[in-house]
Image (cartoon, rainbow, N blue to C red):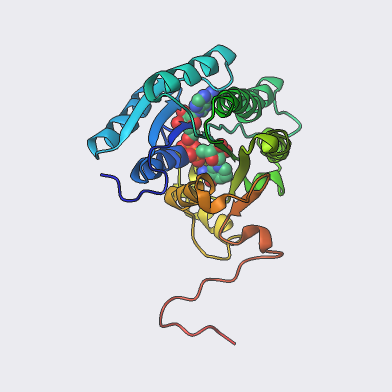
Amino acid sequence: MATGETLKGKVAIVTGGASGIGRAIAHAYADQGAKVMVCDIDEEAGEGVAADIVDSGGEARFRHCDVGERLDVRNLICATTDAFDRLDILVNNAGIVAGGDFLTLTEEDFDRVIRVNLKGHFLVGQAAAQQMVRQIEAGGAPGTIINMSSINAVVAIPTQAAYAASKGGVKQLTEAMALSLAPYGIRVNAIGPGTIATPMAGAVNSDAAAQRMVLSRTPLGRIGQPGEIASVAVFLASDAASYMTGETIYVDGGRLALNYLAQRPVKAGEEKKK
Ligand code: NAD
């Protein structure tokens, strides 16, 4: 059942919508009245997300699409306009990681990450923008694009060289896209999450030592939830963000503001030590 009307009647594609942050965004958009095309390479989970949205009274479809495959991407745009007549919002969210020591990181792993995280944003972003421009030329309103960057666009993890490079690339791609599409009124922004509780965050979800390490760099003292990224994605897609383009919003519990280590969070009823 829709719980708001912020995106009423809008048509949105969410790539990587079968899991984690993408799934939360797909649900949040549907809750706000959008028609959602969930795209992923995981068909079973993606079909499940679309079915859950429909069961809750929303509108959604699933389309298998590898964001690094140009033909898949073209077919995704066609499937979306066939199903819902238009395209108003793209969330470029699909992403992967491949960790490893820099000295031994393989070319294959480097290529794999760049292909999905950076080239995928380009391919889907360009095809979606072309569709949005066609709609504008036919008298329609401009759409908007949201890319999924990361705090790793500006700070790095030594064992995630390909990922950090891809996310830094997404930040700059966002700015170039925003400038190119501004004459059409198409806004392009990015979100840079900190550590969010999804399958991608892996050990941080279950391993106490990994969690302690992450929290020592997280002033708010907890891991973020996918819904806390989805609410920002709703804002960026909405008219409330009508004068924003070319920006990356970091949603990281304060990590980028932090030099040194985070203090232990003060629990309710506990006085902060002087
Ligand atoms: P996740 O692993 O839960 O979801 C990623 C989804 O992308 C999966 O459903 C996967 O099947 C899909 N996918 C992978 N390759 C694809 C391809 N080639 N084509 C289409 N879909 C593909 O991860 P998540 O944490 O929800 O990550 C979503 C986005 O948020 C990613 O871009 C990630 O880099 C970014 N991010 C996540 C975190 C975090 O801490 N979880 C932090 C910063 C940024």
> 79 above or below 36?
above
Quadrant for the C terminus in the image: bottom right
| Position of 2 relative to 183 (above/below) | below
Task: Decide if residue 48 is on the left or right side of residue 263.
Answer: left
Left or right: 201 in relation to 182: left
Task: Judge whether residue 149 can be spotted in this image.
Answer: no
Q: Residue furthest bottom?
A: 274
Instruction: Report x, y in % for residue 121.
Output: 61, 29
Q: Residue furthest right?
A: 103
On screen, residue 263 versus residue 202, left or right, reads right
115 or 238: nearer the eye? 238
Query: Which of these two is toward me, 82 or 56?
Result: 82
Please indicate whether residue 188 sits to the left or right of residue 87 in the image: right
Q: Residue furthest front?
A: 139
Q: Give the position of the N terminus as an image quadrant.
A: top left
Identify the residue at image location x=51%, y=71%.
265
Residue 17, percent from left and from top: 44, 33
**Residue 231 position within the rendered picture, expressed as x and y whole percent measured from the top left:** 46, 51
30 or 21: which is nearer to us? Answer: 30
Residue shown at the point (52%, 64%) measured from the top left: 221
Q: How many marks?
A: 0
Q: Is residue 38 visible?
A: yes
Q: Residue at x 66, y 27 (%)?
A: 114
Say if 255 sits above or below 132 in the image. below
Q: Position of residue 108 (x, y in %)?
A: 67, 20
